[in-house]
Image (cartoon, helix red, strand yellow):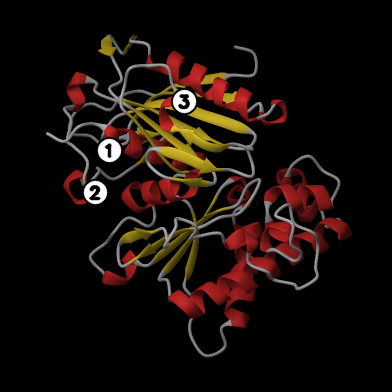
Amino acid sequence: MAGASALNVVVRPEGRPALMAGREVMRLPAAALGVILVDHECMRCVVAVDVGGTTMKGGLITQDGTILYAERRPTPRAEGPAQVIAAISAFVTDLARPRTLDDAQVRPEAVGLAVPGLVTPQRALYSAALGWKDVPAEAFTDVALPVALGHDVRAAGEAELVYGRAAVRAEPPAGHVLFMPIGTGIAGALVLGGSLYGGAAGWAGQIGHVPVWPDGLPCSCGQRGCLAAYASASAIASRCGETSAADVARRVRAGDPRAVTVWGEAAEALALALATYTLLLDPALIVIGGGLAQAGDLLLDPLRERLGDRLTFRPAPMVRVSGLGPDAGLLGAGLLGFRALPRL
């Protein structure tokens, strides 16, 4: 398909760590998360699709987090919600076809979809980014497999909790984490006491719309001065007349005055929002994900410094880049897929 790209990932031999794009990951504590155990040697897996505003990432995921196959396709957002839903369905259908990988037959057993907006396991209730309202899970697929929906950022946060830097350690504070991907927008997955927190109606984590400068820049949500209007990758790029935040980062490294100013304002906006979050909920760790995290220390160094300056009477939490990188949402969708399977 035009615009699509695919990747085969070598399946790990039994007894060795799973690999994702060259990274070792933890094995999934299935019992603790309420999902079922599978036999890796049988190549049991689920279809996973992480739907973003620009790109859809799909793949076949095993229970231990091995990505057997991965592919990207563009999200046809400009064509309207019906076309986005149709594109997701076609993607799922293609991924669900039986195939042979490493001389083994692979037949997915369920589908996990990580989507933006307000969502329950059965329905995508609303997404401003993609324009849909009250879409049942079954509308996203024509295949006869169990399907579960989940919020994209919370799914990525759960993957980070299971496989990545936020993985639960022996120390209790590790169960208090904010996972915050920064891409087209900004949102957060809140881990409180070792459990993901969605709030009374599932709206928790909308940190991108925390006002950092009253009457500041307009935001796509209709308000002004939101964090996302200053610090999302799309906002940073737009304010510098670039197509991507990576282009702005290159200009920052070269000392371009406009890029340096915009980058500094983004770091300050992030520090303001994260200081508020820290004072309210006292996380041990803040994990930055999404496309902007690829800037590494160019982002983390000023953010850590400014966050520390805002927390005058207490230490700042650790701030790190996601260990899963762009795989977090896809792995989170895989966890959703395994949760859709009937319990043994």
Q: Are marks 1 and 3 in contact (CB under 8 Å)?
A: no
Q: Residue at x 30, y 62 (%)?
A: 194
Q: Is residue 294 left or right of residue 17?
A: right
Query: Farthest front residue?
Result: 134
Q: Are marks 2 and 1 in contact (CB under 8 Å)?
A: yes
Q: Secondary structure at mark 2?
A: helix
Q: Which residue is mark 3?
A: 139
Q: Amino acid at mark 3?
A: Ala
Along the polypeptide, which appears first: circle 2 or circle 1?
A: 2
Residue 32 or residue 307, whichever sits in front: 32
Residue 229's x, y, as percent?
73, 58
Q: Secondary structure at mark 3?
A: helix
Classed neighbour count for the residue bearing mark 1: other residues with Cα under 10 Å, few (<14), some (14–19), many (≥20): many
Q: Which residue is mark 2?
A: 33
Is residue 228 visible from the viewing direction of this image?
yes
Is residue 249 visible from the viewing direction of this image?
no
Classed neighbour count for the residue bearing mark 2: other residues with Cα under 10 Å, few (<14), some (14–19), many (≥20): few
Residue 244's x, y, as percent?
74, 42
> Is residue 339 depicted above or below 222 in this figure?
above
Q: Secondary structure at mark 1?
A: helix
Query: Farthest bottom residue?
Result: 313
The number of callouts visible is 3
Residue 181's x, y, as percent?
55, 52
> Is residue 237 depicted above or below 21 in this figure?
below
